[in-house]
């Protein structure tokens, strides 16, 4: 190696590393938070009845309206996409407001609710509150959303009929702030045998969910907001770490789906975890064939 060649190589490596870091920062802080995936997920659920086979629900959470790149204009775009989809219902998993994110601005629950009206005019929308909503004013947020036609289910259940499928939607209060009461929430659905979809904000409640729920839908984690190759998700706001961070999780025959959310909190960054509307198609699980 020529004298000084290693210095040239080091400088080139430094420049390449710097450019890569800048590109990664631009992607994480500017580009990815602006994206919106409409991601299809087919969930095979044991015991899901034939009359409900193929039921479609759009699930999303953590709108955090007012976080960077996530203002009213973006909310209107999301509402337009949801209203135009072929889903039978929409499930909103809480955290409509934002309490603490760099470069964000506060948008009231009343304003957010008004912009949801075009959606509730088209299809049923079921929702729970998240911790950010409670930190602001839980009762006021609930009242605003209800006034716009959203069916709020805080430790409550609603029997509904969607495209020939009769089922229960059960909503459970937030694990951190909402005083979750599973007994009260599931009581109306305890005895009739209809399928149950449970909706809650924080997936840390999942281990306590009764087997009565064919599917639990949650948000809160944002999928960690950052997922790095080899390193995983450095920060997930859950006592279970990455266990319930994102996607379809099956434990002991019970099913959980965690949608990665729309907005951001604390830092306005997403890397490897783009904002998502999760389009869920619910199917009856086919038992494996018996072999002699």
Image (tube, helix red, strand yellow):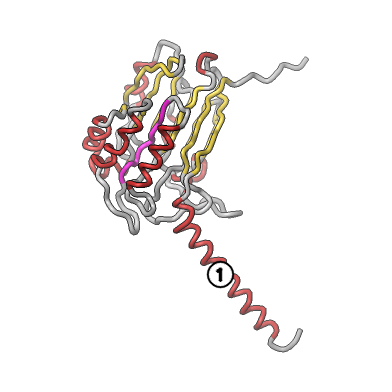
Q: Quadrant of the C terminus?
A: top right
Q: How many numbered circles does the render carry?
A: 1
Give 193 or 259, whichever is nearer the viewer. Answer: 259
Task: Give the SS element for disc 1.
Answer: helix
Give 104 or 31, whichever is nearer the viewer. Answer: 31
Residue closest to the far bottom? 3
Name the side, left or right, on which 105 lies relative to 281: left
Give 41 or 128, whichever is nearer the viewer. Answer: 41
Residue 69, horizontal then vertical, whole percent: 39, 53
The residue located at (33%, 39%) in the rendering is: 130
> Based on the displayed image, in which of its 4 quarters is residue 10 positioned?
bottom right
In the rendered structure, does residue 103 fall within the stretch colored magenta? no
The residue located at (32%, 55%) in the rendering is: 104
Residue 194, horizontal then vertical, whole percent: 44, 14
Residue closest to the far top? 192
Residue 211, horizontal then vertical, whole percent: 47, 22
Name the side, left or right, on which 198 lies relative to 247: left
Q: Quadrant of the N terminus?
A: bottom right
Residue 234 appearing in the image:
no
Residue 180 appearing in the image:
yes
Q: Eyeballing the image, is 222 above or below 170?
A: below
Region in magenta: 89-97
Name the side, left or right, on which 122 lies relative to 142: right
Packing grade of label 1 (10 A; few <14, some 14-19, many >=20) is: few
Name the side, left or right, on which 175 lies relative to 23: left
Give 39 or 208, whichever is nearer the viewer. Answer: 39
In the rendered structure, does residue 92 fall within the stretch colored magenta? yes
The residue located at (29%, 41%) in the rendering is: 112
What residue is disc 1 on?
A: 19
């Amino acid at each position: 190696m020529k004298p000084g060649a290693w210095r040239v190589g080091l400088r080139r490596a430094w420049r390449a590393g710097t450019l890569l870091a800048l590109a990664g920062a631009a992607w994480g802080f500017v580009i990815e938070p602006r994206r919106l995936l409409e991601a299809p997920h087919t969930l095979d659920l044991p015991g899901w009845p034939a009359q409900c086979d193929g039921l479609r629900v759009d699930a999303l959470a953590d709108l955090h309206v007012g976080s960077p790149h996530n203002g009213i204009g973006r909310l209107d775009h999301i509402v337009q996409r949801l209203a135009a989809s072929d889903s039978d219902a929409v499930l909103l998993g809480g955290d409509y407001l934002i309490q603490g994110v760099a470069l964000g601005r506060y948008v009231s629950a009343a304003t957010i609710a008004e912009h949801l009206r075009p959606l509730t005019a088209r299809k049923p929308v079921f929702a729970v509150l998240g911790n950010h909503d409670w930190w602001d004013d839980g009762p006021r947020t609930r009242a605003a959303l209800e006034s716009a036609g959203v069916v709020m289910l805080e430790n409550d259940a609603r029997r509904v009929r969607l495209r020939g499928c009769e089922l229960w939607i059960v909503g459970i209060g937030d694990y951190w702030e909402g005083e979750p009461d599973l007994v009260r929430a599931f009581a109306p659905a305890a005895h009739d045998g209809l399928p149950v979809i449970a909706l809650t904000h924080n997936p840390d409640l999942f281990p306590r969910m009764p087997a009565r729920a064919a599917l639990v839908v949650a948000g809160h984690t944002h999928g960690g907001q950052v997922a790095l190759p080899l390193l995983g998700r450095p920060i997930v706001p859950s006592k279970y770490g990455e266990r319930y961070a994102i996607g379809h999780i099956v434990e002991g025959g019970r099913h959980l789906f965690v949608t990665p959310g729309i907005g951001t909190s604390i830092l306005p960054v997403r890397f490897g975890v783009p904002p998502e509307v999760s389009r869920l198609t619910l199917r009856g699980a086919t038992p494996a064939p018996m072999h002699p």
